[in-house]
Image (tube, rainbow, N blue to C red):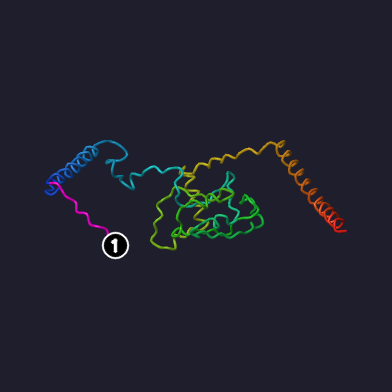
Amino acid sequence: MPRRPIVKKEYTLGERVYLVEIAKGLRLTWKHFTFNVRASFRKGPHTVPTCWQYPEDRREIAPIFRGAHMLQLNDKGQELCVGCGMCARACPAKCITVKRGKPAEGEEDKYAGKTMCASFEVDMLRCIFCGNCEKACPKGALVLGQDYELAEYEPEKCIYDKERLLANFQRAKAEGRLKPPPKPIPVDAPPPKKKAAAGKAAKASASEKAAKGKAAAPKEAKKKDDKADKAKE
């Protein structure tokens, strides 16, 4: 493969001396330094605008932020998850494990459906926070909340079980950080029934014509054969 020709760039005198470029850099540095010093004396939630004083000063999280998972409860305090496993099927990272079960006798009121999830685990070390599990849930039970402080010292603690997912929901509800319900997707209205009936009638007439044509084809072929036989005689 031929090599590309090397093009030598010709620098001006100011670029070769570097004094002009150094002066431009120092000017920009001094500009930001003086701006931050003046901003540090202002009153506000954060002292310097370019640096948030975490964890005392926290930024607002968008309502559609995808953070730690949680299992939601309805207004009656019942579990919405029915253990269908749609979230586990939709997960591209295969980090969700769900087992379905039936409520024990006398505990049917704790669950919104006839079935429940006997166990629910999410491996946060494999999760990519894509939100496919949240979209695939038919009951709206699994939601990605706004918790982003997920660091742990032990990898075993990064596997969230059912109890921890329910605790995430209770904590978010107490702090008022629950996600708003998703907006309904607009669906086009079905066509009027008259047009549908006319279309069905047209299809029926077309099928009848095709059937008649098929039935008439062997008769015409027979007539041609008879004419050919008479011509031979």
The answer to if 9 sits in the magenta stretch is yes
Q: Is residue 89 above or below residue 36?
A: below
Residue 132's spot in the image, x, y percent? 51, 52
174 and 53: which one is in front?
53
Residue 221's spot in the image, x, y percent? 81, 54
Q: Amino acid at mark 1?
A: Pro
Q: Main secondary structure of the magenta part?
A: loop
166 and 122: which one is in front?
122
User: Which quadrant of the rendered structure holds the C terminus?
Assistant: bottom right
Q: Is residue 160 above or below residue 56?
A: below
Residue 163's spot in the image, x, y percent? 52, 56
Residue 81 horizontal side relative to residue 4, left or right: right
104 and 88: which one is in front?
88
Would you name the residue on which mark 1 appears? 2
For image coordinates 48% across by 52% down, the residue present is 69
For image coordinates 32% across by 39% down, the residue present is 45
For image coordinates 70% across by 37% down, the residue present is 195
Q: Is residue 220 above or below residue 31?
A: below
Dot 1 falls on a residue whose secondary structure is loop
The 10 Å Cα crowd at callout 1, few under 14, some 14 to 19, many 20 or more, is few
Residue 76 horizontal side relative to residue 45, left or right: right
Q: Which residues are magenta?
A: 1-12
Residue 126's spot in the image, x, y percent? 45, 60
Res 224 quadrant in image: bottom right
The answer to if 132 sits in the magenta stretch is no
